[in-house]
Image (tube, rainbow, N blue to C red):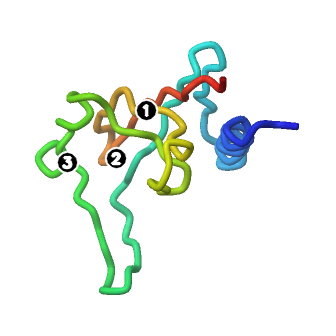
Amino acid sequence: MLQRRDQLIYRLAADEMSAGGPISYDKRQHTVEAVISKGSPVQRDYGVEVLRISPTAVDLSRLREGGIPLLDHHKQDSINSILGRAVDMWFDCGALMGAGHFSQPP
């Protein structure tokens, strides 16, 4: 039976394959590159949210100061929700891109 972390990784890879995009998961390094945000409009209770994606609008200092956790579905209630850490971020064609490192299962 697959561990939850492995199930998430396989699902991410399957989503990438069905979208026709590259699969960037490196099994040996436990890393992946992904689109973090394109600033696409999202309907919220208060209206439509559109994030500005640019070096002047996005503060990456938290990444440089120790990293940003990769969470399981925005859950922040437990250390078990942390799948790994973001290790790099950059801007490409109006999108915020990132590289993540998944923690190794015990």
Measure how far apart labels 2 and 3 are at the Cα level.
11 Å
Q: Nearer the viewer, residue 16 or 46?
A: 46
| Residue at x-position 58% and y-position 28% | 24
* Of the image marks 2 and 3, the number of the one nearer the N terminus: 3
Asked which secondary structure carries label 3, the reply is loop
Asked which secondary structure carries label 2, the reply is strand
Q: Nearer the viewer, residue 54 or 62?
A: 62
Q: Residue furthest bottom?
A: 46
**Disc ID at residue 95:** 2
Question: Tags 1 and 2 in contact by the CB under 8 Å rule?
Answer: no
| Residue at x-position 54% and y-position 38% | 83
Residue 30: x and y, percent? 58, 22
In this rendering, position of residue 30 left or right of residue 57: right
Which residue position is annotated with label 1?
85
| Mark 2 or mark 3, whichever is nearer to me | 3
Which residue position is annotated with label 3?
58
Residue 13: x and y, percent? 68, 38
Circle 2: residue type:
Ala
